[in-house]
Image (cartoon, helix red, strand yellow):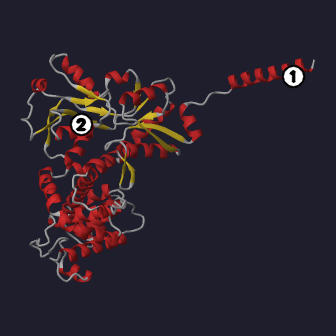
Amino acid sequence: MHSRIFAGVVGLAILSSVVLNACTPQKNLLEQVLSTGELRALTRNAATTFYEGPHGPTGMEYDLLQRFATSLNVKLTLITSDDIKDILDQVEDGDAHVAAAGLTVTEERKQKVLFAPAYQSITEQLIYNRKNQRRPRSLVDLQSGKIEVIANSSHVERLIEIKQTWKNLSWDENKTAGTSELVNLVAEKALDFTIADSNEFSINRRYHPQLSVAFDISEPQQLAWAFNNSEDRSLYNKAVTFFNNLKNSGELDNLIERHYGHINRYDYAGTYTYMYHVNNRLPKYQVMLADAAQVTNLDWRLLAATAYQESHWNPQARSPTGVRGMMMLTKVTAKQLGVVVRTDPEESINGGARYLRSLIDRLPAEITEPDRTWLALASYNVGYGHVKDAQLITEQLGGNPYKWEDLKKSLPLLRQKKWYKNTRYGYARGLEPVKYVENIRSYYDILRWQLEKGLNDSVPESILAYSSPIL
């Protein structure tokens, strides 16, 4: 009897639970993300998407995702994969909330996933080594060379389209390599051609001055996030609003400028000279640079990049305005720093390092890295007073005076009477500090890449150990 009563109670409880669940509305995807406090995002580990930089995690996709997660007041959890098919499959299966992996919007992919509004436009480019062969002029020239591309990429889809016209076209698909590896194989003459998105090649081109774009193989293509193509579009709709706000506020343009601006303005013609000097001049001064950087708590590679921008690592350098030496110090600054002989490389490096550190420390505490370093370098070039003037102009224009992306738009205005007449320090050649900082950023990136790849074997282990994460 008792067992039947117990069974009846259990059955009633189960029935009640079923009825209750049937009456309780299920949470949509956005509500699930908000309740768990976690946004799960798929991405690729690459220079244009997400990677561990000198200041921590960075990359265009990472910055976008972090802003989206912040707008939802949830934490960001990244899941990385190098296989584009795997990324799309996981989104389609609902294993992640979103894929932000530099994905090109294609008709084939639109059959599987739902794309958010595009955030960047790129073209697909044929890359070749101009030291190894003549520039291909048309698709006909591709039929005799070895082409290798990323497996399951939009580049494969494009080649399949081309093959419908050019029947003899063939290529290999690499399932493990990313764009940087394939570009490197072309640089090493192991491949004749590869295909890269224009934004990815612009980053990698600095490391391989022998590489060039033969021609675009596509019309402009759009990059966008991918979502599960289900009826539940709650999270997708939130992303649509997010990107619309990002575009309307100008923040999207600022992000693109942050990640690609200094690259687009870099003088590629000078890369050969720079790499030559890295191997032939830098070894003479590496210990001096490392010692000075350690004392002043700077990254020695930053100090080296600054010295190269100043003098091309020439201790006898002199400018028409009277600045001299490796770090091109004025007489007044040298005296303040206790530098007696400006053409003495060790004195100049030590003095320049102390001066740069003083500029970094002088800036308001609200300015965080990496902007703090970029503003200090601009001050090194044009003077802290002019930087302060540019900060006031930035505020007048509605920008953030603590962000380099905004400040570098204001600095060139110091050449115009309309703007400089109302400043404390007056006229300045404001375009020069912008070029100055952007060049140093590229010199730094190239030097860091060379050292990580082991392309400069003359660097002692003791110096490599002091490549601080400050910058």
Name the residue nearer the viewer: 393 or 277: 277
Question: What secondary structure is found at the residue carrying circle 2?
Answer: helix
The quadrant where residue 275 appears? bottom left
Which quarter of the rendering shows the N terminus? top right
Amino acid type of the residue tagged 1 in the rendering: Phe
Q: CA distance from mark 1 to mark 2?
A: 69 Å
Q: Which mark is residue 416?
A: none
Q: Residues within 10 Å of mark 2 (few under 14, many from 20)?
A: many
Q: Residue furthest left?
A: 134
Residue 384 x %, y %: 28, 71
Which residue lies at the image location 27% right of the left edge and 37% below the top edge?
179
Is residue 297 depicted above or below 71 in this figure?
Answer: below
Task: Judge left or right: residue 23 versus residue 138.
Answer: right
Amino acid type of the residue tagged 2 in the rendering: Leu
- Residue at which label 1 appears: 6
Q: Residue furthest right?
A: 1
Residue 136 x %, y %: 9, 31
The quadrant where residue 458 appears? bottom left
**Residue 101 seen in render:** yes
- Residue at which label 2 appears: 182
Q: Residues within 10 Å of mark 1 (few under 14, many from 20)?
A: few
Which quarter of the rendering shows the C terminus? bottom left
Residue 24 x %, y %: 68, 27
Which residue lies at the image location 23% right of the left edge and 61% below the top edge?
305
Task: Judge left or right: residue 22 versus residue 132.
Answer: right
Sequence order check: which comes first, mark 1 or mark 2? 1
